[in-house]
Image (cartoon, rainbow, N blue to C red):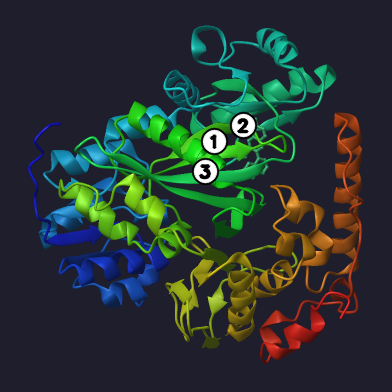
């Protein structure tokens, strides 16, 4: 093993805002590291600014002119003498030019090496790299020469060979952008051209490739960690199948459907993928888990993820502290065997968004009243407070409510309790959605996949208007037709419940307390 010199960090600039900036600073403070905040005009009074030892203004509210400007972040480091940067998630966290610029300026980038970010940034390159390491990828075709299809005709030939349905995906994509599902040959050419146009517009790169579509998969991701001494471990899985339009809403660890044997196999596959790019620090390998129990690597996220707390809860570790250890050149604090033996219980995270619970549109504004849940085994990672203005310029997630329990039943019950304690007024939130989701019989059974919210919209919408119900029923009908086309029988979907009826307009901001929820959303109660 190489001899890696350790360097003790003293002052960390957090190139982010909101709950993740606060969360990173908490660990820095615990370790005796000084912290530097950066902030836009919209964040002058934000909690991350108040928490930091130093704070540097970096421009107007739009992130393109503040949190995304590499030169401004580097200037803030210089001005404050920061010797490290934590990028959080989003913004510059997966920008290899930023990582490179930090290191070139003698500032430790708390994250992977730029080369690993680059290799995983291209989905086609990632497929080649990890499958060479033995990690299963979705059956597909990267195109002649391995980097995309030049025209629809060659892509169609590949799609025929793979077998419909297929997905056309952007090599530069991720998170569902530039992705088209194609059920059969007739639609193929227009979908191909559309996907290419969309990819060119979104990423400035129209490279597209093809994968076999996995029907009704679960989204299971494995947390991995590497150090500079050649150690790579995994910290099990998170089930992130509860998503809406590629935005995660509820996550849990462990997955209700992952056995110890499957965890061992998926963990080994993720570790192999990380090793293939000499991975350093915290990373996540995303997999699709098919109904048949097969799993396939999708992509690797080269950052700390939003949902990392559920992993922290069941392993009893501080992943940000591990990131700092690795950035200082220290070995990982635990071996795989130690990690395996300390995993305990179950954790659930609900992302609380400032959004209209019916129309799912952002709902910025002033929080006029706030009561956050607490009590045993409840964690609320938040970047806002009573009286705060939720800016329009950034992600509308206002907090992550995370609970731990000895088992899934206890964790789910505890989350219901915590959600019922949570009160927000002045802005709309998705709290009502969460209260219904955590009581939905399929969720309670752990029986869900990535299509859950789409199919169950009517039962998960607190006060749907006639239009919303119509749209949901239409979506279900399309889904059922789709299922018939793909040959798989599905459970009858369209059931409505009392919560979907009787209220013409959403009224979440007028709620008084949680007790009403126990009554109103109890199933057939
Ligand atoms: C897929 C898939 C089925 N088959 N790939 C969506 C986001 C991007 N990371 C990959 N995505 C998918 N890729 C194959 N070959 C289904 C999805 C998908 C999905 C994946 C994870 C979580 C939610 C999802 C919702 C819709 C589609």
Which residue is at 61% across, 28% downward?
Answer: 169
- Distance (Cα) linking label 3 and label 2: 36 Å
Ligand 1 under 8 Å from disc 2 Cβ: no
Q: Which quadrant is the C terminus positioned in?
A: bottom right
Query: As rendered, which of 489 and 146 lies closer to the eye?
Result: 489
Closest to the camera, between mark 3 and mark 1, is: 3
Query: As rendered, which of 262 and 352 lies closer to the eye?
Result: 262
Q: The residue tagged with tag 3: helix, strand or loop?
A: helix
The answer to whether the residues at label 2 and label 1 have Cβ atoms under 8 Å apart is yes
The residue beneath circle 1 is 202
Left or right of residue 509: residue 354: left
Q: Earlier in the sequence, mark 3 or mark 1?
A: 1
Q: The residue tagged with tag 2: helix, strand or loop?
A: helix
Closest to the camera, between mark 3 and mark 2, is: 3
- How packed mark 1 is, by other alpha carbons closer than 10 Å (few <14, some 14-19, many 20 or more), is some
Q: Which mark is residue 198?
A: 2
The residue beneath circle 3 is 263
Q: Which quadrant is the N terminus positioned in?
A: top left
Left or right of residue 251: residue 242: right
Which residue is at 10% across, 59% downward?
Answer: 81
Image coordinates for residue 283, horizontal then vertical, percent = 39, 44
């Amino acid at each position: 093993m190489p001899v890696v010199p350790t360097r003790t960090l003293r002052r960390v600039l957090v190139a982010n805002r909101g709950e993740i900036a606060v969360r990173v600073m908490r660990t820095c403070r615990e370790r005796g590291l000084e912290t530097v905040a950066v902030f836009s005009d919209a964040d002058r009074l934000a909690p991350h600014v108040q928490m930091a030892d130093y704070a540097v203004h970096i421009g107007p509210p739009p992130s393109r002119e503040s949190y995304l400007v590499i030169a401004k972040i580097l200037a803030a480091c210089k001005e404050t003498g920061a010797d490290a940067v934590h990028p959080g998630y989003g913004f510059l966290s997966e920008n290899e030019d930023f990582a490179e610029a930090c290191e070139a300026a003698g500032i430790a980038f708390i994250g992977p090496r730029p080369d690993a970010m680059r290799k995983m940034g291209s989905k086609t390159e990632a497929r080649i790299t990890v499958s060479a390491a033995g990690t299963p990828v979705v059956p597909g075709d990267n195109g002649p020469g391995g980097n995309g299809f030049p025209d629809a005709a060659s892509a169609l030939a590949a799609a025929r060979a793979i077998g419909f349905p297929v997905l056309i995906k952007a090599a530069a994509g991720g998170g569902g952008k530039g992705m088209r599902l194609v059920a059969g040959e007739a639609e193929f050419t227009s979908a191909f051209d559309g996907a290419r146009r969309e990819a060119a517009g979104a990423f400035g790169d129209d490279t597209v490739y093809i994968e076999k579509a996995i029907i009704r998969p679960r989204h299971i991701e494995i947390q991995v960690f590497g150090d500079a001494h050649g150690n790579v471990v995994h910290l099990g899985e998170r089930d992130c199948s509860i998503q809406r339009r590629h935005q995660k809403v509820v996550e849990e660890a462990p997955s209700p459907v992952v056995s110890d044997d499957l965890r061992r196999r998926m963990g080994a596959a993720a570790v192999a993928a990380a090793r293939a790019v000499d991975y350093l620090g915290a990373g996540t390998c995303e997999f699709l888990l098919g109904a048949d129990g097969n799993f396939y690597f999708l992509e690797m996220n080269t950052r700390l993820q939003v949902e990392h707390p559920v992993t922290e809860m069941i392993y009893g570790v501080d992943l940000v502290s591990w990131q700092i250890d690795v950035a200082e050149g220290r070995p990982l604090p635990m071996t795989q065997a130690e990690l395996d033996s300390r995993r305990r219980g179950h954790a659930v995270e609900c992302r609380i968004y400032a959004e209209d619970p019916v129309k799912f549109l952002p709902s910025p504004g002033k929080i006029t009243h706030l009561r956050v849940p607490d009590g045993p085994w409840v964690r609320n990672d938040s970047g806002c407070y009573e009286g705060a203005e939720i800016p329009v310029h950034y992600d509308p997630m206002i907090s992550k409510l995370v609970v731990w329990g000895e088992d899934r039943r206890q964790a789910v019950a505890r989350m219901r309790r915590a959600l019922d304690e949570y009160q927000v007024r002045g802005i709309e939130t998705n709290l009502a959605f969460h209260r219904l989701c955590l009581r939905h019989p399929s969720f309670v059974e752990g029986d869900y996949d990535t299509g859950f919210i789409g199919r169950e919209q009517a039962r998960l919408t607190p006060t749907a208007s006639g239009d919303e119900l119509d749209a949901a029923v239409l979506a279900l009908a399309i889904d059922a037709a789709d299922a018939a086309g793909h040959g798989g029988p599905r459970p009858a979907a369209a059931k409505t419940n009392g919560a979907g009826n009787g209220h013409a307009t959403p009224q979440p901001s007028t709620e008084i307390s949680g007790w009403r929820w126990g009554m109103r959303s109890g199933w057939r109660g």
